[in-house]
Amino acid sequence: MMPPVRCFTCGAVVGDKFEEYSEKVAAGKKPGAILDEMGIKRYCCRRMLLTHLDIVDEAIAFRTIK
């Protein structure tokens, strides 16, 4: 699934930062430090990146083909 393009609360664009955030998390950096480094200060925007789950692989198992 796609990460949200905008923050649900304040409307700031966060979708363009998700790829960089994901790469740094996979490299082993702490998520909070990454968000500070990227300049994401609002807790509502931080929530959008911290809590996103990519569940497309799990959801595809339940698809129906007709």
Image (spheres, grey):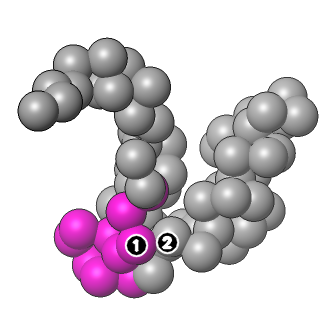
Foreground residue among 36 and 7: 7
The tag on residue 14 is: 2
Residue highlighted by disc 1: 5
Relative to 17, does residue 58 appear above or below in the rendering?
above
Observer able to see residue 37: yes
Foreground residue among 39 and 12: 12
Query: Residue 38, how many percent across, how many down?
Result: 73, 67
Is residue 4 in the magenta section?
yes
Q: In screen coordinates, is 64 left or right of 13?
A: left
- Of all residues, the one furthest to the right in this rendering is 27
Classify 10 Å Cα crowding around label 2: few (below 14), some (14-19), many (20 and above). some
Foreground residue among 33 and 24: 24
Q: Residue at 88% of width from left, 34% of height from top?
A: 27
Dots 2 and 1: beta carbons under 8 Å?
Answer: yes
Look at the numbered disc 1 and give the secondary structure of its residue: loop
Is residue 64 in the magenta section?
no
Q: Which residues are magenta?
A: 3-12
Q: In screen coordinates, is 10 left or right of 1?
A: left
